Amino acid sequence: MRQAWRVADVRAAERTLLERLPDGTLMQRAAAGLARRCALLLEDAGGVYGARVLLLVGSGDNGGDTLFAGAALARRGAQVRALLMRPDRVHLAGLRALRAAGGFTVRDLPDHADLVLDGIVGIGASGGLRREAAVVVERLSHLRGRDGRRAVVVAVDVPSGVAVDTGDVPGDAVTADVTVTFGCLKPAHVVGPAAVRCGQVELVDIGLGPVLRADPAISVPDAADVAEWWPHAGPASDKYTRGVVGIATGSATYPGAALLGVSGALAGPTGMIRYAGSAHEEVVRAHPSVVTVPRVADAGRVQAWVCGSGLGTDGEARTTLRSVLATSLPVVLDADALTLLVDGKHADDLRRNGPLVITPHDGEFKRLAGEAPGTDRVGAALKLASWMNAVVLLKGDRTIVATPGGEVWANPTGTSALATAGSGDVLAGLLGSLLAGGLAPERAAVAAAYAHGLAGRRAAADGPVAAPDIAAALRYTVRDLTGR
Ligand SMILES: NC(=O)C1=CN([C@@H]2O[C@H](COP(=O)(O)OP(=O)(O)OC[C@H]3O[C@@H](n4cnc5c(N)ncnc54)[C@H](O)[C@@H]3O)[C@@H](O)[C@H]2O)[C@@H](O)CC1
């Protein structure tokens, strides 16, 4: 698991360290780690000696890191040029170090560079990029290096132009191949469109960890977390003790939603699936292991329900929703069930004891919350989670899972391959199975999003992806993830 901290908490930790260490120590640590990573990138691309390195240098300490790293590369024989955003306000010690190592300043963007270090602005950024910086950033993609290859862009701490605490990208911003960050991750590395701008994120240890006292803002699961959480059958397990998941999705009009939900659940840990709904004949034909009935009331015992997609919004759909909410079991609500919640007729049904997980995309979120997630997706998801007393899985390139208690997770496995009709039905089915298998709601949501993303990637490796391909890939993804 990795974790990200907000700027104010990073600053507080940095202040503590700065009081304990001689002046400049932190910046030297940061610059040394940055230079080491840049040297490795250059070695991969033909060597450090003679490589053309361009530094984009802002007026704060982010520019200082960049100048010191540039000096280290110049000492190894790289031709280092620095473009200063504000020559009148530059980190003077950094500039002196660069010059002493043989580096130069330039007045305009050169035509060629093998490596660009983006040190325009780091965690001290406020608002969108200023004009002089935006003009430079717009032209970066034209830079060419050795053999006509595109210059490799390394962002120092964060890509300039991103909103560090929210992961928003309000305007022009650097798109990096690698982001070298210091001390700890920040939200922009793991959520929102900013995370995509970071490329590969690498962390340089500057000794911040022991003095980071605040709780992290966001956690990012890894494969080991998901494997550890995934419920496993033991020698004494039977189909009931492994959990029974109830799927109340789809309808005679939309049987596909039912089939996809079931196929997602089939990749989960439960020993049995019960389907309740008007698509019951199609479901049993396609999946003979599923026990099917026409109505939730007839379904028998389950340990969790999935309700929503393809249900429609008529009286029968309302009855289905009411029936699952009347239980005290964990419930996943998706798609049409979320639409049904909007008109307020189910307010009383929502006052229940059982855990609730909702899985909106942005449009559904807007209908539920009254406004789109906006620029602060984490903040918006937390607000809705608290308001609905539900775990909110807000779908996106970096799907967010927020709990009513204030915990936030960002899924790192997302892929655009998942943006296809029915993909969410597969996710909801898997999530329901994990809940029925005994996993706590937030872990079930995090683990389902993680496996679903990996399955999307696996399916995409074979060509264009439709939802059944994601469901088919899930089985192998779960095997690889859990070793079973
Ligand atoms: N504080 C510390 O102890 C450490 C800080 N480090 C570096 O210092 C950085 C933070 O330094 P600062 O606090 O000086 O802040 P930054 O260097 O991130 O940014 C502040 C400067 O950027 C300008 N600026 C602000 N918003 C801008 C915008 N939208 N467009 C263009 N320019 C803008 C400001 O005028 C100011 O001069 C970190 O990101 C990291 O790179 C590292 O050296 C590690 C230790």
Image (cartoon, rainbow, N blue to C red):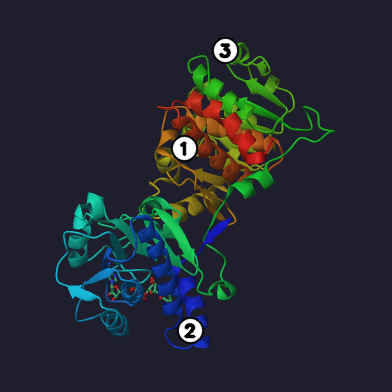
Front position in the image: 53 or 330 = 53
Asked if the residue at label 2 sits under 8 Å from ligand 1, the reply is yes
Q: On the rendered structure, is 80 left or right of 392?
A: left
**Residue 128 found in image quarter:** bottom left
The answer to whether residue 300 is visible is yes
In contact (CB < 8 Å): disc 2 and disc 3: no
Q: Position of residue 26 (x, y in %)?
A: 45, 79
Question: Which image quadrant is residue 65 in?
Answer: bottom left
Q: What residue would you read off at disc 1?
A: 342
Q: Which residue is mark 2?
A: 18
- Residue in front for this viewpoint, 43 or 139: 43
Answer with the quadrant where ligand 1 appears in the image: bottom left
Is 464 left, or right, of 344 in this rendering?
left
Q: Is mark 3 within 8 Å of ligand 1?
A: no
Residue 257 point in image, percent of width and height: 51, 23
Q: Report if residue 308 is visible in the image.
A: no
Q: Residue at x 22, y 57 (%)?
A: 140
How far is mark 1 from mark 2, CA to CA?
51 Å
- The quarter of the image holding the C terminus is top right
Find the distance from the CA under tag 1 to the CA under tag 3. 30 Å
Disc 2 crowd rating (10 Å Cα; few below 14, some 14-19, many 20+) is: some
Ranked by sequence position, the earlier of labels 1 and 3 is 3
The secondary element bearing badge 2 is classed as helix
What residue is drawn where x is 31% and y is 76%?
Answer: 60
- Residue that carries the numbered disc 3 in the rendered image: 282
Say which label, 2 or 3, has the lower sequence index: 2
Amino acid at pointer 3: Glu
Amino acid marked by disc 1:
Val
Report helix, strand or loop for mark 1. helix
